[in-house]
Image: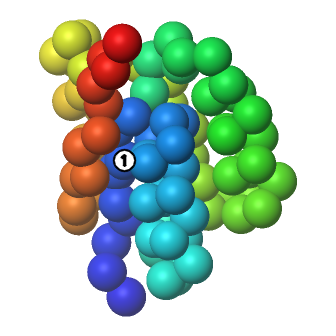
Amino acid sequence: MRGDALVTGGAGFIGTNVASALVQSGRRVRIFDNLSRKGVDTNLAWLRETYGERVDIRPGDIRDRAAVGDAVAGVAEVYHFAAQVA
């Protein structure tokens, strides 16, 4: 089995769906998101209720170098969807 995956912006629409697909394929997924968009708490609740401990949620901002370093530690792949779209 491949290692854990990190999804930056993982609480948004695209990130949530990518995280779901990764978990369904047998992966553990770490979500890194600053949680600034309306509705992301609902997405995270759904991921947690659906996949439990296979989803690790780490609030943080990609502009914080130390937080990014902590988020990528130990993961095999990074899927980057963190962005401000508005």
Direction from residue 64 to residue 50 in the image, left or right: right
Q: Residues within 10 Å of mark 1 (few under 14, many from 20)?
A: many
Is residue 38 depicted above or below 40 in this figure?
above
Instruction: Identify the residue at horizontal 36%, vertical 12% (top origin).
Output: 86
| Residue labelled with disc 1 | 7
Residue 49 falls left or right of residue 22 = right
The amino acid beneath tag 1 is: Val
Where does residue 7 sit, x and y in percent of width and height? 37, 47
- Residue situated in front as seen by the camera: 17 or 70: 17
Where, quadrant-wise, is the N terminus in this rendering? bottom left
Residue at 30 percent across and 40 percent down: it is 81
Give the residue at the far bottom of this rendering: 1
Q: Quadrant of residue 39?
A: top right
Residue 59 % position (x, y): 50, 23
* Residue 77 at x, y percent in the picture: 22, 61
Q: Residue at x 67, y 39 (%)?
A: 44
Is residue 48 visible in the rendered image? The answer is yes
SS of the residue at dot 1?
Answer: strand
